[in-house]
Amino acid sequence: MDYPGLTHHGAVRGVTGSCHQLHLGPGVSLLVDCGAEQGADVMPGAQGSALGFDITGVQALIVTHVHLDHVGRIPALLAKGYRGPIYCSEPSAKLLPLVLEDAFKLGIDSTPAQVARYITLVHSLIVPLPFGHWHAVVQHPQVACAIRLQRAGHLLGSAYVECDIQHGPNNTRYVFSGDLGPGNDPLLRPLQPPERADVLVLESTYGDRLHPPTGDRIQRLEAAIDRALADHGTLLIPAFSLGRTQALLHDLEDVLHRKALLGKTGPSPQGEPVDWSQLPIILDSPLAQRITQAYRDLHPYWNEQARARLAGGRDPLAFGQLISVDTHARHQQVVNYLKSTGRPAIVIAGNGMCSGGRIVNYLKGMLGDPRHEVMFVGHQAKGTPGAVIQGSCGAPGVVQVELEGRGYAIAAKVLNASGYSGHADQAGLVAFATGMMQAPHAVVLVHGERTAKVALSKALARCYRRLQWPTKISIPED
């Protein structure tokens, strides 16, 4: 192998399992992310059970962000004996133990003593790094490497990683994009392209599409709430605990605040109008509650607009109508109450693809009633219950979805709300890859389906030809 060089241990067949090994010299390497494969074809609980590669010579793990498809194999890495540093941004250092603890309980061992031992080990290895500052991670006689984390705009703490490598007289810079955000998150500061990259390892999740305009997403959310109020139904939002939930809460607080200022009530053709100020917003996910609290604690990392809202006395993540459901017994009480009464409500519950978690009980109790509405705010992977429910919108006849081994007819309304994607689209990815001061030598496309990678490769090639940049674009094979 020529040094520096790359080996990919995931995210080359699809959009999950990100794990890239940067070889700096013989027996000296770094890992960038250590993610689990996810999707309908992966057995529940097995995502972090196998590492799949030798860790001899790995000096450090660098985490771009704390979604499981980027950190879900850390338990397997530790089980292999890794005890080196886990570098991540300062916000990620707060969020990573929460995510790994939940995954450990669900997939490996829920025994309190084992969980406590594992999380103590995780805490001992995490090294928080501030954004925008170089940090030496390898110092060997023949090779040295420093890294710098820059904001990626995907979720709080997400970063892309610049690796500056000094190999003898040669200096080479590798940049790993991690997951890049679309630039419209209400809480996050925007990302800036790197100043240079000799090799850019670039995600391609939405490399084959452009996002629709997002300026009216709050209006679409408000319209969905109006329908739920008019029908005396519940608006069910399956959402992922990290990132999407916090963006939703921000938008809901904004809607409720404006309604309160206008003194508006919700429509109700069946009787007295429903007072918006009495509409409960139910967050039914223990993990989402812990992460939301961590987001609140990390408010210095929010963007200027969100911090200004907080300084003005409004908390977009903790407002008066927000109700958190903690215990399973309380959860079941809420499900039964909403199913049997005409009380309108909004429920945000995990998981985002309806393949497990507390959202399943709400769906089992309410999918058969047309008063209710299910609103999706993210991609539904093929084969998941969420994809079936999402695909029922406009389908002829009665569509059934299987939930925990039993079929349920879908009579509830189904809405696909755009504007909540956490990933940059093709235009955003191209802007990132062409926003440098000089041409990269190579771009390596990962973290995407084959069609997305090919489409992004063609779009990049067109832009590089216009710029007269002789950049080589490659798509690694599994």
Image (cartoon, grey):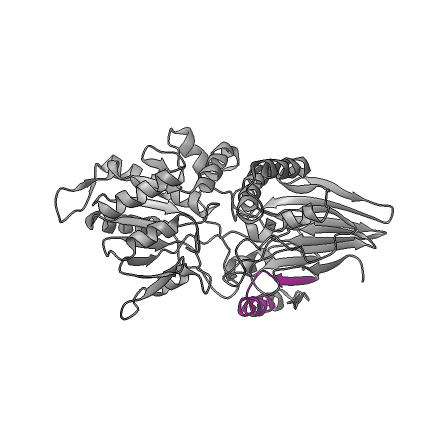
Q: Quadrant of the C terminus?
A: bottom right
Taking depth in this image into account, of 31 and 218 the one nearest to the observer is 31
Residue at image point 44% right, 48% down: 244
- Which quadrant of the structure image shows residue 440? bottom right
Tell me where residue 3 appears, x and y as whole percent: 80, 58
Q: Quadrant of the N terminus?
A: bottom right
Is 235 within the magenta?
A: no
Residue at image point 70% right, 45% down: 147
Tell me where residue 437 appears, x and y as whole percent: 65, 54
Does residue 390 show up? Answer: no
**263 relative to 63 in the view: left or right:** left
- Secondary structure that dominates the magenta span: helix
- Which quadrant of the structure image shows residue 274? top left
Is 445 within the magenta?
A: yes
Residue at image point 59% right, 68% down: 457
**307 relative to 412 in the view: left or right:** right
**Residue reaching furthest right?**
141
Tell me where residue 277 appears, x and y as whole percent: 25, 36
**245 relative to 375 in the view: left or right:** right
Compared to 459, does 246 lie above or below? above
Residue at image point 13% right, 42% down: 272
Tell me where residue 129 appears, x and y as whole percent: 65, 38
Total marks placed:
0
Does residue 191 show up? Answer: yes
Q: Which residues are magenta?
A: 442-462
